[in-house]
Amino acid sequence: MNKDSVFDEIQGEEIVDQLANVVHLSEMEHRLREWLMKLGKLLLQVWLVWLTPRYHAVRVVCPHCEGRAEYVRQRRATLRTMFGIIGYRRAYYLCRQCQRGHYPLDEKLGLRPNGLSAEVERLAGLVGVQMPFEQGSLIFEALTLVKLSDHSIAQATRRYGQQVVEQETEWQDLAQDANYLEQTTRTQNAPLRLYGALDGGRVLIRPHQTEPQRWRELKVGAWFTARGQPPRHPDDTWSIRAQDITYFTDIGGCADFGELMWASGVQRHAHHAPELIFLGDGARWIWDMVDFHFPHAVQIVDWFHACEYLMPVAKSAFADETQQKQWVSEVKTALWQGRLDTVIAACTTYLVPRRPDDPAHKAVTYYTNNRHRMDYPTYRAQGYQIGSGTIESGVKQIASQRMKVAGARWNLDHARLVAKARAAFLSQQWDALTAATLHAASTH
């Protein structure tokens, strides 16, 4: 559609009659949005024409091999924009040396012929990391008047996830580069106290060929700083708040995830932080990973997870609820004060040897294996965060709220990309990813 036909379409709306017949503000707003969309479409097309040189250079430098690319002809393309689908023409050049072609206008403006504009993709991806793609398609059209299929929403979201993969690959290469690591020792960006935390959630993965459908663990990590002080008593209000949070996530083995943890940690200068504190729920894979990559970090078992083992013991030992609460309160106080021998002894008293799922046995094992990570009086004296709510929130927002939506069964690769895109959004990195993509397109 050329600019004249768009202009005629706007004029042919019989605007005066419509203005006279509309009686509700909502309808007035909707009509005005439609007219502004058509006007915006016209202006965008005119703008692209204005940016297209009237006379094309016979030869330009090939962006692929820096040879000489020769002008061939004008080629037409379409682009799905925030104002609808527009068509435009631009010069096509072919390099005789490397036999590759390019479009200078596309590269200059970051255009994606026959695809989504960068702005549409940015907003579509934002919708895709928040809700199921089919629902996102409806919401996107209602908010923007631009119709996108659920497939387009999914593609935009996964494209951002792929950008995260490429960024993480670059980080991992740098994290294995001795020269780069040496350079980071001279930076002043390392925080005085940095926290790390790890946890996992589950994602339902569709079967691949003959493989059965199964749940896979989505591992999630977080880096953050915190402000505030821990409470004086275990039941007081907590004032410590996490800030400057960055999440990383993947579906795969511990070795690969450990490399990602190390690489993302290098980006946060975790290897140079004067104080590095890791929080976890006591899972063995977490502490093995921390021991391997950050052996000098302070390891803390999340206070609330540590307390969760007490009530099942109390319910097994006492029928009376008052006795249950009193016992939990006493043992919880001992745990708060760092008297682990007292805690273990209290649980040992109610062991049921022949019971396979004996909660007392689970508690004794848990506290014994993690006692060196439960020195809560020392942690509080240092002003450390001793709760892992930050990583639990991350797992909830990535694995539960987005990946476990009703009826969702994910292709493994797609699940990884959407989870990574969601993590980037929660880490306030969306605009940075968009800017990096536009910069790469304009300098290609």
Image (cartoon, rainbow, N blue to C red):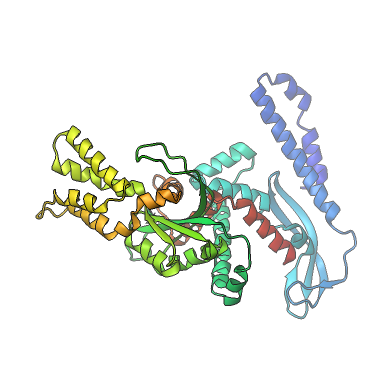
**Could you say which is closer to the camera, residue 55 or residue 401?**
401
**Could you say which is closer to the camera, residue 422 or residue 158?**
422
Residue 3 in the image: state x and y as whole percent.
Answer: 81, 45
**Could you say which is closer to the camera, residue 384 or residue 184?**
384
Q: In this view, does 444 lie above or below 10?
A: below
Task: Please tell me how many numbered marks the rendered image carries.
Answer: 0
Q: In which image quadrant can residue 109 be found?
A: bottom right
Residue 354 in the image: state x and y as whole percent.
Answer: 9, 55
Please say whether residue 388 is visible from this viewpoint. no
Q: Is residue 92 above or below residue 19?
A: below
**Drawn side of residue 383 relative to residue 55, left or right:** left
Residue 146 in the image: state x and y as whole percent.
Answer: 64, 42
Q: In which image quadrant can residue 9 be found?
A: top right
Q: Is residue 63 above or below residue 341?
A: below
Q: Which residue lies furthest to the left in this view?
A: 354
**Drawn side of residue 25 relative to residue 307, left or right:** right
